[in-house]
Amino acid sequence: MRKNDINADRLAMLRLLKRRGIRDEAVLRAMAHVRREAFLPDELREHAYDDGPLPIGEGQTISQPLIVATMTAALELAGSDRVLEIGTGSGYAAAVLASIADEVYSVERKKELAETAIQNLYREGFDNVHVCVGDGTLGWLQHAPYDAIVVAAGGPEVPPTLLDQLGYGGRLVIPVGKHQHEQKLIRIRKSLDGSCDQESLGSVRFVPLIGDEGW
């Protein structure tokens, strides 16, 4: 696909996001800035701005742009925030987060995907994303607490360890459901007294969250 086609497709994606209710200007700027094609296998780059998930290997997918934008907007990020992402994948959503937040710490279960994501992020100039291989349900304690946590896989419940690593006043966005491929996207806010309020943001379908506190 020619560069002009990619640029036109990215603009079309932005128009779609606005029509579907994405109003957060910081999120829209980030989605405009990050080259989704750079986080896809070569043979799929012509589909980079299709509004759907795409395979990235290891049985995993890159989420559709609308889902990435929705989850990022739900985090209500500020420029000084430190974010924990569970499920790095190819690094695309981490790049979107890093275009808004100060630092992003991302945990990927599959070593091959983590290595690819690191390469993608380095090539695209995102030096404020830190990737490790591990059990995402256990978070990344070394850098806790976090202002925001986002989980790109669906679990049977909210992992208690992630709640523990969420800072006071923080937001956690995660798909939760009793079935592995059908969930509700929920947002949890942790108050200054440590109590948590939960709200549903709609139905979603993610790959299962595998780990000690997942499936």
Image (cartoon, rainbow, N blue to C red):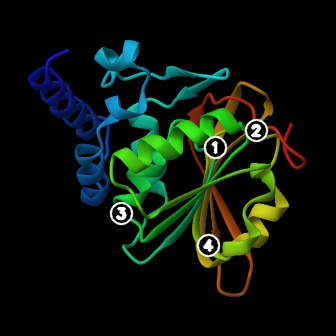
Residue at screen point 65% across, 33% down:
112
Going from N to C along the chain, the mark reached first, 2 or 1, is: 1
Quadrant assignment for the C terminus: top right
Contact (Cβ within 8 Å) of mark 2 with mark 1:
yes
Residue occupied by mark 1: 87
Residue occupied by mark 2: 209
Quadrant assignment for the N terminus: top left
Label at residue 100: 3
Residue occupied by mark 4: 146
Contact (Cβ within 8 Å) of mark 4 with mark 3:
no
The answer to whether 145 is drawn above or below residue 41 in the figure is below
Q: Nearer the viewer, residue 124 or 68?
A: 124
Residue 39 x, y percent position in the rendering = 41, 33
Q: Amino acid at mark 3?
A: Ile
Residue 134 x, y percent position in the rendering = 77, 50
Q: Amino acid at mark 2?
A: Leu
Mark 3, secondary structure of its residue: loop
Label at residue 110: none
Residue at screen point 65% across, 86% down:
192
Q: Residues within 10 Å of mark 3 (few under 14, many from 20)?
A: many
Residue at screen point 36% across, 73% down:
79
Q: Residues within 10 Å of mark 1 (few under 14, many from 20)?
A: many
Residue 98 x, y percent position in the rendering = 41, 59
Given the current orientation, which residue lies at the most extreme right position? 212
Going from N to C along the chain, the mark reached first, 4 or 3, is: 3
Q: Amino acid at mark 4?
A: Tyr
Q: Amino acid at mark 1?
A: Gly
Going from N to C along the chain, the mark reached first, 3 or 2, is: 3
